[in-house]
Amino acid sequence: MKNLEQHRQNFPGLGYKVYFNFGGQGIMPNSGLKAILATYEYLEEQGAFSLQANTWITERTNLTKKAIAADLGVTPETITLTENVTAGCNIVLWGINWQVGDHILLTDCEHPGVIAIVKEIGRRFGVEVSTCPIMETLNVGNPVTVIQENLKPNTKLVVLSHLLWNTGQVLPLAEIVEVCHNYQGNNSVQILVDAAQSVGCLPLNLTELGADFYAFTGHKWWCGPSGVGGLYIRPEAFSTINPTFIGWRGVKTDENGQLISWKNDGSKFEVATSAYALYEGLRAAIATHIEWGNAGERYQKICELSKYLWELLSQIEGIKCLKNSAPEAGLVSFQVITGNGSHKKLVENLEKQGFLLRTIADPSCVRACVHYFTLPSEIEQLVTVIKTLI
């Protein structure tokens, strides 16, 4: 593994702040910024719509899919490039052939953007929507049991997050997938995973986990540019959804430009021209992380650092961490329980002193995110300042 202090020099944004908001937006490495600029310069030199430029774009797009697939333990053909997590969730949710009376099961820890899609599908197609209480299993209880008890004979899809954005809980996804796929036999219940917080944070092998759909973004824990994400579709689930938005990238044509058929890989769900330079930025960012260590090594470091932050916060009178035990990933959520304890005010005051965190509405708390290149000294500085502000 590369020296951490040396490695941090790749992230110029770290020089101006003490950053604890990787779950919202990662700090992009120099390599990503340079790759984006170099791509725009190259395309302008070649002629943005020249044969050579288009061939280059196709080659580089495929390389980006290969880099993503390698980090997720899948093949490039299973990856659809999108703009963000929500775009991936939309592809799946609007691509299913819903029938009146079908049922979608959500957890009570999902992001408002995804909840809004599901509610509109319920309204438009007469689909039943219900929510199960996963939040209460943060410290006690079994989320697998909760999911299982809330499945119904008409359940068609379960929508959940792998790493919960609000409490930091890591759900046992493989066990949940097994319960859903075996419910009434024949893989009857599919699973759509909101992977906003898990990709780039947890070590993943999506082939082994078995989820049908896994929607992710590159701008959080992968520290890529905003505007690039992806969707993994399990090969066995590929034929169960169809495109809602359609364009030339998703179809096959003959030499005369006449439509032949859909493409039979992830590009079936891609539409048209994109900001291709951002693909290069994401690929460079992923490579930068790998330079320091593999996914397992990065995750181990994240857990060490989040445990350290959790331990120090737990020692502050007036602070209560949501988890009763050390976090299983890089999200550490806590509450101010003394005085007038305004979470919003605390975050605002921290930002004035160069510490970037964020508030969460449900449950009401402050969320701090540590990455593998966060320094223990930064954690200590944060805790010291929090003590002066509560």
Image (cartoon, rainbow, N blue to C red):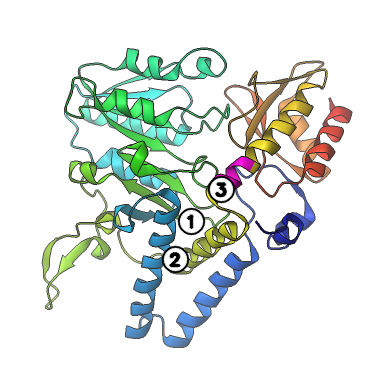
**Amino acid type assigned to the residue bearing label 2 in the image:** Ala
Residue count near mark 2 (Cα–Cα under 10 Å), binned few <14, some 14–19, many ≥20: few
Of marks 2 and 1, which one's residue comes earlier in the chain?
Answer: 1
Residue placed most toward the observer, 245 or 209 = 209
The residue furthest front is 1
The residue at the point 42 percent across, 55 percent down is 70
- Image position, residue 73 (x, y; %): 39, 49
Residue count near mark 3 (Cα–Cα under 10 Å), binned few <14, some 14–19, many ≥20: many
Of marks 1 and 3, which one's residue comes earlier in the chain?
Answer: 3
* Numbered disc 3: secondary structure: loop
Q: CA distance from mark 1 to mark 3?
A: 11 Å
What are the residue bounds of the magenta stretch?
296-300
**Amino acid type assigned to the residue bearing label 3 in the image:** Lys
Q: Which quadrant would residue 157 be assigned to in this image?
A: top left
Q: Is residue 241 above or below residue 13?
A: above
- Using the rendered image of the protein, determine whether residue 24 is visible from the camera's viewpoint: no
Q: Is residue 85 above or below residue 358?
A: below
The residue at the point 78 percent across, 39 percent down is 379
The residue at the point 48 percent across, 56 percent down is 227
Give left or right: position of 107 versus 23. left
